[in-house]
Amino acid sequence: MNAPPAFESFLLFDGEKKVVIEKDTKVPQAAIFTVNKEDHTLGNMIRMQLLKDPQVIFAGYKVPHPLEHKFILRIQTTADYSPQEALMNAITDLISELSLLEERFKACFTFEAVKEKQEGFD
């Protein structure tokens, strides 16, 4: 088949960086982040988290091609806030939200298991 090997979708090649940052020269206070070996799942989560920040003017991403395992994220912020800061804050907030989701899921799952055991004894 013509499909690339599956490992190319998640393993970084030698010398390949996970994130490449370049300043956007067309728009003030903007940057372009290329995130390698990731897809729409992470790109959309980061974009949505960035848009919750009132100091972020624009946040958008695109996947250049379905066979390229990367997404390009463009961020524009207010004058007193850098795009790098915005991205770091968005990632930190996402980690917190996902940790809380995991905690609640485990608590609910554990509760349901205990409830099922109790119903079995009735």
Image (cartoon, rainbow, N blue to C red):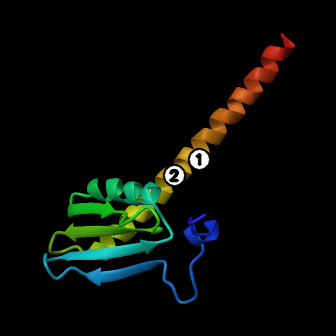
Alpha carbon separation for disc pair 1 and 2:
6 Å
Q: Are marks 1 and 2 in contact (CB under 8 Å)?
A: yes
Residue furthest to the front in view is: 1
Question: Would you identify the image quadrant in which residue 85 lies?
Answer: bottom left
| Residue at the spot 13% in from the left edge and 75% down from the top edge | 27
**Circle 1 is placed at which residue position?**
102
Amino acid at circle 1: Glu
Identify the image quadrant of the C terminus.
top right
Quadrant where the image shows the N terminus:
bottom right
Q: Residue at x 39, y 81 (%)?
A: 20
Question: Is residue 106 at least partly visible in the picture?
Answer: yes
Amino acid under disc 2: Leu
Assign a secondary structure to mark 1. Answer: helix
Q: In front here: 41 or 45?
A: 41
Q: From the image, tell me which residue sits under label 2.
A: 98
Residue drawn where x is 44% and y is 64% of the image: 92
